[in-house]
Image (spheres, grey):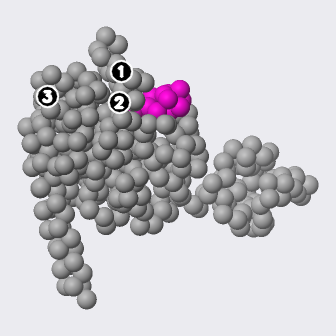
Amino acid sequence: MIIVLKTNLSNQEIEEVFHKLESLGLTAQLVKTKPNTTIAILDDVSTLPTHLISQIPYIEKLIRLQLPNPLVKSSKNKAIKLANGLSFGNNNPPIIIAGPCAVDEPNELIELALDIKARGAHILRGGAFKPRTSPYDFQGHGLDALKTLGEAKQITGLPIISEVMSAEQVDLALPYVDILQIGTRNMYNYELLKEVGRSDKTVLLKRAFSATLNEWLLAAEYIMSAGNENVILCERGIRTFETYTRNTLDLSIVAAAKRQTSLPIIVDPSHATGKEELIRPMARAAIACGAHGLMIEVHPQPDKSMSDKEQAITPNQLSEIIADTEMLYQTINKLDHSELIALT
Ligand code: PEP
Ligand code: MN
């Protein structure tokens, strides 16, 4: 980091800045430059909060040489181990997360969990607390739904993911879930990000429907800087002028994010399109562009789903997507491999 001091400071004022920097445990080196004197900090200050330095008197500006999101960008070949022994991310085969938008009937959920497991899904999803645009829409069955998910896990062994929207909901969900989901509407809820960052559960961070790549990665940095390294990113569509689809699936961000971080990144074609008939083609496209997995809403009888029925697919449709995914993953691996051979 370079610290640019105000002009025309006395030696005593410059020394005062040095003392303050020393009291923060930093090694500083004076560089006499004109018109401003500058100080070089020799330590790694990537995780030091900027305000600790910027509030020192006589400082004109700070120039950080480090990346603004060092933890997100420095993780290498990141793979996250799941409770059932599977690894998520890096070059591992894509992970399929499937289940209803919201947990409704307990027996139905357990039957569905057994069914999707037999078809090759790896993780069971199900909303207990639903973030709905209208306060009059179904808000989820809360703790009862979490208990049902816990039962489904005991019976099937599938790890569980469910969304939390507040610190209280994090406490309620911890005994039942393996992955805490932060939904699109809460990506900017920094207190919630810190809260899940303090937990020992993997966090799935959905991109806000209005977030830039940088904002999304900085949201992940919030979770990681609170102590939790296990973050999975999820692209779920952004808001554009197009109203035919529920959102616009931004697959370029998957390839772009993969160039900036090795955190696993998955795609949710259900909320991206809002249309059952578009999920399979978009799931194929997601795997083809390098997504580490998919999150898909599945219901045994989509018409009876308590929320998002237009985008729910049946277990049979899920089987087709899982078959596509396996085939595409192998094909892409072969292509990547032949590219490597061509280069050598
Ligand atoms: C969900 O996955 O249940 C959900 C509400 O998704 P999103 O936050 O992407 O709208
Ligand atoms: Mn939904």
Q: Are marks 2 and 1 in contact (CB under 8 Å)?
A: yes
Looking at the image, the residue that sits furthest to the front is 155
Residue occupied by mark 2: 148
3D distance between C-alphas at marks 2 and 1: 10 Å
| Residue wearing tag 3 | 302
Say what secondary structure mark 1 lies in. Answer: loop
Residue for point 25% across, 32% down: 109
Q: Is residue 95 visible?
A: yes
Residue 271 in sight here: no
Q: Quadrant of the C terminus?
A: bottom left
Residue 190 lies left or right of residue 203; in this view the side is right
Q: Main secondary structure of the magenta part?
A: helix
Three-letter code, disc 3: Pro
Residue in the foreground of this view, choosing between 288 and 230: 230
In the image, taking residue 7 as reference, residue 260 lies left or right, namely left
Q: Secondary structure at mark 3?
A: helix
**SS for callout 2:** helix
Viewer-side residue, 102 vs 343: 102
Q: Indicate the position of residue 90 as horizontal and vertical percent values.
A: 35, 64
Q: Which residue shows up at 32% across the image and 41% down it?
A: 155
Instruction: Point out the frontmost of discs 2 and 1.
Output: 2
In the picture, the disc for residue 141 is 1
User: What residue span does the magenta drawing correspond to?
Assistant: 163-173
Disc with the residue nearer the chain's start (2 vs 1):
1
- Residue 302, horizontal then vertical, whole percent: 13, 28
Question: Can you say whether 121 is above or below 37 in the image?
Answer: above
* Nearer to us in this view, 148 or 325: 148
The answer to if 166 sits in the magenta stretch is yes
What residue appears at the point 42 percent right and 58 percent down from the top-left corner?
81
The amino acid at mark 2 is Thr
